[in-house]
Amino acid sequence: MYKNILFDMGNVIMDFSPDYLLSMYTKDVKLINFLKYKIVYTKAWGKSDKGELTEEGIYEEIIKDLDEKYHALAKEVIYTWYKYKTENSEMYELIKDLKNKGYKLFLCSNAAESFHKYEDSIEAFKLLDAKIVSADIKEVKPNREFFEYVLNTYKLKAEECFFIDDIAENIRGAYECGIDGYQYNGNVNLLRKFMKRVAIL
């Protein structure tokens, strides 16, 4: 019997589209794609999720491989991108329903320390019992250590947890720790139907 529902953040509780976020800085699609691969999809960005780099550290790493004319724009993106994150309203309603049914709710996200700049502005987060962020614990999904940290810290039984993430590799990581999961594809109604079929809802 499930008692705890674990949620990923990006593309689950929050919509995360680098293309959309970068369109807030430029309408030039070629520049959007350029910035996406020079900033977001980089080792430096990944290191920030591991808690190894601050925003300043990301910037310093990125400009090593960036023409000086892009430095100011890169800095603006790195320090302000999260202002354009959007909350998934349908997922928020599902989280409310699960809360009302008495489930314990946890955020389990790969995210940088900048998470703490916007966490208080997200309505769904106010309903959660705990927020576990990779930069804080220096472990990332799908590593076993991430899930063991969650289970051990909050004294949860793996078989009583159900994990929702959009990335198959993360679901597999949880499964290998004994946690059942659902690979979310962006369709909340389908997730609701699944939860009714397996008696979560």
Image (tube, helix red, strand yellow):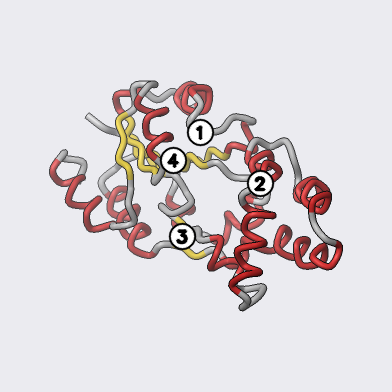
Q: Which mark is residue 141?
A: 1
Q: Amino acid at mark 2?
A: Thr
Q: Amino acid at mark 4?
A: Phe
Residue 80 in the image: state x and y as whole percent: 69, 63
| Residue mark closest to the camera, 2 vs 4 | 2
- Work out whether residue 130 or residue 35 is closer to the camera in this orientation and state it: 35
Read off the residue under disc 2: 42
Read off the residue under disc 3: 15
- Work out whether residue 194 or residue 6 is closer to the camera in this orientation and state it: 194
**Does label 1 or label 2 sit earlier along the sequence?**
2
Question: Which SS class for mark 1?
Answer: loop
Q: Residues within 10 Å of mark 4 (few under 14, many from 20)?
A: many
Gap between marks 2 and 3 measured at Cα: 20 Å
Question: Which SS class for mark 4?
Answer: strand
Read off the residue under disc 4: 106
| Residue mark closest to the camera, 3 vs 4 | 3
Q: Amino acid at mark 3?
A: Asp
**Does label 3 or label 4 sit earlier along the sequence?**
3
Please give left or right for residue 65 compared with residue 9 in the image: right
| Residue mark closest to the camera, 2 vs 3 | 2
Q: Residues within 10 Å of mark 2 (few under 14, many from 20)?
A: some
Gap between marks 3 and 1 measured at Cα: 18 Å
Residue 22 in the image: state x and y as whole percent: 61, 67
Please give left or right for residue 140 compared with residue 105 in the image: right
Q: Which mark is residue 37?
A: none
Q: Residue furthest bottom?
A: 27
Gap between marks 3 and 4 measured at Cα: 18 Å
